[in-house]
Amino acid sequence: MTATSDRTSEAPVTLTEDQPRTLGFTDQLGLWANLGISLLIPVTATFLVVPGQSFVATVAAIVAGTVIGCVLLGLVARAGAVTGAPTMVLLRGLLGRSGSYGPTVLNLLQCVGWATYEIWIISYAAHAVWDDLPRWVYVLIAGVIATLMALRPLGSVRLLKRIAVVAVVACSAYFMIETLRRPLGDLTEGGFTGFWTSMDLVIALPVSWIPLVADYSRFSRSPRAAGLGTALGYAASSAVFFLLGVLALRAYAGADQDVIGALLAVPAGALALVILATGEVDEAFANIYSTATSGQNLVPKADRRVLAVLVGGVATLLALAVDGGAYEPFLFLIGSVFVPLAATLVVDFALSRGRYDTSDAAPARWAMLVPWVAGFVAYQLTAPTILADWASWEGFWRDAQDLLGVSPTNGFSASLVALAVAGLLTPVARKVATVRS
């Protein structure tokens, strides 16, 4: 693909067209800092506040999870900049073209899921501020705006860098200052109960962006700018928002563990919340755009704009019916799928010295599925995902734990176990793949 220096360039509409290399460090930093400023992150903080766990332990889980997740995110962003390929096309180098179809389908599902939850949280927050309009009106407004932004992704990135970041950062700072002014109680009371589970939840957020990250880093002028800008931008803002959620719940305990209610309890919180909800549209746009881009791995000549409209429509319809009850297991399921995939990709790309075949003729490397699948199994054996509407899923893994003698309360981090298993098996799988090629 041929780069261009035209800063007015937009993303190509198909995979077969030339692409610009116009995004620098500050572009990537601004984009990912903005993506890390999300109302879904304080909502996630609700699940981090485990009974018996101290505030200090929760903060430690936020720091550790952010570092691990964002290092993986930055490394995959760098790989995307090296190859100039979106993430699902980058996976052709890991699994071959036909092998990349599996993770592509899974990513399509998770992207639609994320876009749905982003539109849902926007409508939920807006309706909480002003309930004169029914929630479905806010859903439609958010869905339409996010879809329109997905039609011009690079222009949206530059707009976020210049305008949106300032407003959302100001509101975030205001919320942080106001919550810190409130009595927060004994910050050391309690222990490290649930620390690993909390850390796994934090890791799931940046890892959920790994299947999308190269969709943007491929437009970077350098791999260094892509990797550092992505990792630092998302780490800084997401960690602050995790902390904001935890502090808001402590400062406004009367909000009944509802983060949105806690933020509304802040003086002038309604206005600041509206601004943050408006800024949330960038996350929805990113997921819609990347769903369309991922779909092009299956149909390279498909027009991403048409795909974006279709995806935006589906996510908007789903947001009309979804509620937040399934959000926590959704995060754990994402972690179990994409943490070991990230480990396999990062290790294999490093050992390949960046020489990845991402062409249409990329040969299948089926052996590389082994570390990914093994890591997924290790994650579920450590901490089975609880799916309310699919009880047999948890039952299967509980039975497997009993068979293998794994304690249901083993106290390990499922993410670290999955990373270790996938990372250690990847060099072995590479040798097998090399022998058979």
Image (cartoon, grey):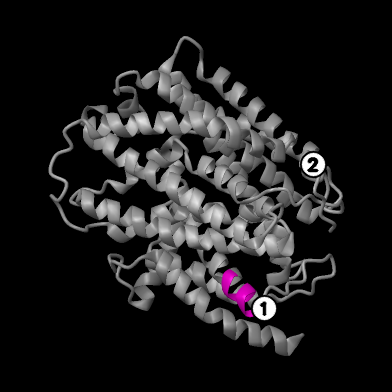
> Which residue in the rendered view is the most extreme toward the top?
132
The label nearer to you, 2 versus 1, is 2
Marks 2,1: beta carbons within 8 A: no
Image coordinates for residue 27, horizontal then vertical, percent: 62, 45
Q: Which residue is pictured at 57% across the width and 75% down the height?
A: 347
Image coordinates for residue 24, horizontal then vertical, percent: 65, 50
Q: Which of 382 and 413 lies nearest the eye of the viewer?
A: 413
Q: Secondary structure at mark 2?
A: loop
Give the overall secondary structure of the magenta segment: helix
Q: Is residue 205 left or right of residue 82?
A: left
Q: Give the extent of the magenta segment.
A: 346-351
Which image quadrant is residue 217 in?
A: bottom right
Q: Residues within 10 Å of mark 1 (few under 14, many from 20)?
A: few
Quarter of the image with the C terminus in it: bottom right
Q: Is residue 120 left or right of residue 360?
A: left
Spatial CA span between label 2 and label 1 = 32 Å
- Identify the residue position indicated by label 2 in the image: 9
Q: Which of 319 and 203 lies nearest the eye of the viewer?
A: 203
Image coordinates for residue 387, horizontal then vertical, percent: 44, 50
- Identify the residue position indicated by label 1 in the image: 352
